Amino acid sequence: MIVGRREAWTGRAFLVLLMLVTIVPFVSLFFTALHPSGTYPAGLDWPSQPQWSNFVTAFDAAHMGELLTSSVLIVLGVVPVSLLLATMAGFAVGHLRMVGRRPVFLMFVLGLTLPYEGIITPLYYQVRDMGLLNSRWAIILPLIGLFMPFGVFWMRAHFVNVPGELSEAAQIDGANTWQQFWRVHVPLAMPAISSLAILLFLWTWNQFLLAIVLVDDPAKRTMAGALGAFQGQWGTDIPLLCAGSLLVLAPTLIVFLIFQRRFVAALLQGSLKG
Amino acid sequence: MSTLASVVEGRPATGPRAARGARRGRRRGQGWVAWLFAAPAIVAYTLFVLVPLVRTVQYSFYEWDGIGPSPWVGFDNYVRVFTDPELSGTIVNAFQLIVFFSGIPVLFGLAIAATIRRIATSRLAAVARVVLFVPQVIPLVAAGITWSWLMASDGLVNQLLSAIGLGGVTRAWLGDFATALPAVGVIGAWVLLGLCTLLLLAGMSKIDPALYEAARIDGAGPLREFFSITVPSLRQEIGVCVTVTVIAALASFDIIYIATQGGPGNTTMVPGLEIYYQAFVERQVGVASALAVVLVVLVLVCVLPIQRLTREQS
């Protein structure tokens, strides 16, 4: 493609500008986190004596070790189960073509636009009546349910494109439906499943509303949820708050950088399909 | 060789055996086995989404504080949602946020993607793809805290404004009655801009370059190309961007909770946050539920037409 040189340079300039706008807030956060605790540094200002210890203080003050564990436990509780349920249902609706698949699918699609605030109030009382309030299950179980619309939608989109001959061939070779599912279809669906896993991991880790409403103890929340409590406690100590925020957003950032390509592809496809 | 292997290798399964298999497959798929597969997902969804949704509607017709008796009040709560300025104002705020959460990311995203399009395959673009996604990856509350700090009285925004000579405009953006809502809007725009730009860019790369070359030959300039070729071809992607950002604006909670708590006054209160306050602070479960129902309906009313307008007729 013939690209005008001027156009290429304008494009580059815009791209760099956009990246700066995206990055500078984090840089500012980082610089501020290094200032002595209790001060009010001005904007972008490298401190004369960087206080790297602020990160340690924030880590301890917020009990980040516990928070990390808590978030990991919640993710482990939510993501594998959601993946399994969504894949099975997507398989049933998209490939097995079950009777009543249209109303069932429609029922899930309706949940795609549902804001969590729409159900948070009764959810609180329901979880309370189940005796799960203030435990990690209070976040895990509702999230599994809330992830079903997107999960089923996503997996169905994959299974709809899998030819029926694959199942029939496996059937002829003596496999029952369950074996067909596990031995043939799940391995084939791995790209779709891993993309879904990434999205669900993100949405679970960053979950805030459910964490602050259903769980009082910051140590049992997600890291994002605990940040709310952190702000309440240390809100006036800006450098410490900034250090804490950086620590909270570091895990998803690191995971993102490791799995970049998968992430970007998943997020793009996720929005398009949703 | 098994039939499965022949299918996987792409060789057609032949003759009567395949036909028999097909008939058997169709009959098998309609059985109860499929329902067994779908059942767990349906149960989880029903239990934790549909039941609460129905309960929200139910609660909205009562007055309840979560513990005591709950007298029936009919549509009183709904009337209050639309007449009490504290509540109806939140809906107005949410719509104002749409201008920022949707307008900026989509419009700027279009412009930027169009400009970047020609270098979309360069290494710089590959780096940009990773960088521009970061706001989507971090928790919204982290974005809220970051920007709260940036927009403070002596934060970076004011520092930059002073540097370019606009020192008179500086203020605590999130604490000022007039600028708090736009300031929150800017935070949302920042979070969503990267996603929209990348989505639109991905859509643009699917446009047949021959169209552009033909336009070039006919003497069309970049603006003409943009409006006549680029934008119409991106209908579906634009639809997705608008849908995602509108939902983000209407259902916003995290950012406002952490940045302004709805203040100063009620200027940044949004339905999501108001529902939270009414239900768990004011102990007005009925009112909260009525507002929740209104919010759900509002989202549907906004999103369905967008989907209708931009879905490809395939």
Image (tube, helix red, strand yellow):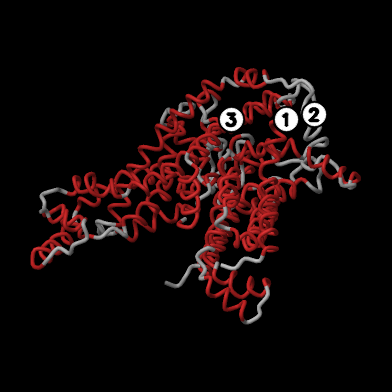
Q: Disc 1 marks which amino acid?
A: Phe
Q: Which structural element holds mark 2?
A: loop
Q: Please report whichever mark, 2 or 3, sits nearer to the chain's N-terminal start.
A: 2
Q: Please report whichever mark, 3 or 1, sits nearer to the chain's N-terminal start.
A: 1
Identify the residue at horizontal 57%, vertical 54% (top origin): B122
Q: Chain of mark 1?
A: A
The image's mark for residue B246 is none
How far apart, in angstroms, are the residues tagged by discs 1 and 2?
9 Å
**Rendered location of residue B45, percent (x, y):** 39, 45
In this rendering, position of residue B168 left or right of residue B130: right
Q: Which structural element holds mark 3?
A: helix
Between B226 and B122, the one lying in front of the other is B122
Per the image, the residue denoted by label 1 is: A31
Q: Chain of mark 2?
A: A
How far apart, in angstroms, are the residues tagged by discs 2 and 3?
21 Å
Q: Please report whichever mark, 1 or 2, sits nearer to the chain's N-terminal start.
A: 1
The N terminus of chain B appears in which quarter of the rendering?
bottom left
**Rendered location of residue B164, percent (x, y):** 87, 47
Per the image, the residue denoted by label 2 is: A41
Q: Nearer the viewer, mark 1 or mark 2?
A: 1
CB within 8 Å, label 1 to label 2: yes
Q: Quadrant of residue B7?
A: bottom left
Q: Disc 2 marks which amino acid?
A: Pro
In this rendering, position of residue B149 left or right of residue B292: right
Between B51 and A107, the one lying in front of the other is A107
Q: Which residue ends up furthest to the bottom in the rendered image?
A: B218
Residue B213 against residue B182 in the figure, above or below: below
Identify the residue at horizontal 59%, vertical 35% (top origin): B280
Whether residue B246 can be seen here: no
Per the image, the residue denoted by label 3 is: A248
**Rendered location of residue B127, percent (x, y):** 58, 47
**Rendered location of residue B168, percent (x, y):** 91, 45
